[in-house]
Image (tube, rainbow, N blue to C red):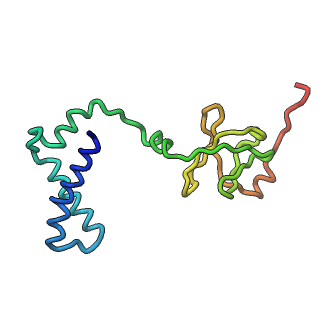
Amino acid sequence: MAKGKIERLFRTVRDRFLTPLSCGTLPEDLDALNRAFRSWTETYHRTVHSAHRSTPLDRWLAGASRLRTIAPDELERCFLFEVTRTIRKDGTFSIDGRRFETDWTLSGRRLPVRFRPFDFTRVEVLVDGVPRAAVPLDPQANVRRPRHRPNPER
């Protein structure tokens, strides 16, 4: 049923927006086409449809109370890639040939790592389900980082 609704929307866009557009003057660039489509969409959403005797906007607003909202930070987390990596003795790990560093006390542990796949501006290591930030490796600073070995007598 949902697929039929989508196909019907595509047909409506083709018949009521694209066909008249191709018969008239074409937009000079993509921004102009986007503006024309946005304008057409605003009109479409405010036009009463004969099938349900209300506007699409009114029907959507009537069911909006059932929608679940999500915080922008949580939404971004849903689209991060996740891989498992072993943290080296110096607190580093690699993703796609890029080296990152995190807390060296995690060394030897195999942990999930989440990241943005194309820009690597957000990389985090999950420790017991809690994200910890990881940063691109700075080799000079990493060499000078203090490391304390746990006391084996404890």
Measuring from the top left, give residue 4's x and y in whole percent. 25, 45
Vertical position of residue 36 compared to residue 58: above or below: below
At horizontal 60% and vertical 34% (from top left) the residue drawn is 130
Measuring from the top left, give residue 9's x and y in whole percent. 22, 50
At horizontal 9% and vertical 39% (from top left) the residue drawn is 53
Q: Nearer the viewer, residue 45 or 9?
A: 9
Q: On the rendered structure, is 38 left or right of 50?
A: right
At horizontal 16% and vertical 59% (from top left) the residue drawn is 15
Q: On the rendered structure, is 76 left or right of 20?
A: right
| Displayed quadrant of residue 63 | top left
Q: Nearer the viewer, residue 102 or 148?
A: 102
Q: Residue furthest top?
A: 154
Number of numbered discs overlaid on the protein picture: 0
Q: On the rendered structure, is 93 left or right of 55?
A: right
| Displayed quadrant of residue 83 | top right
At horizontal 75% and vertical 54% (from top left) the residue drawn is 141
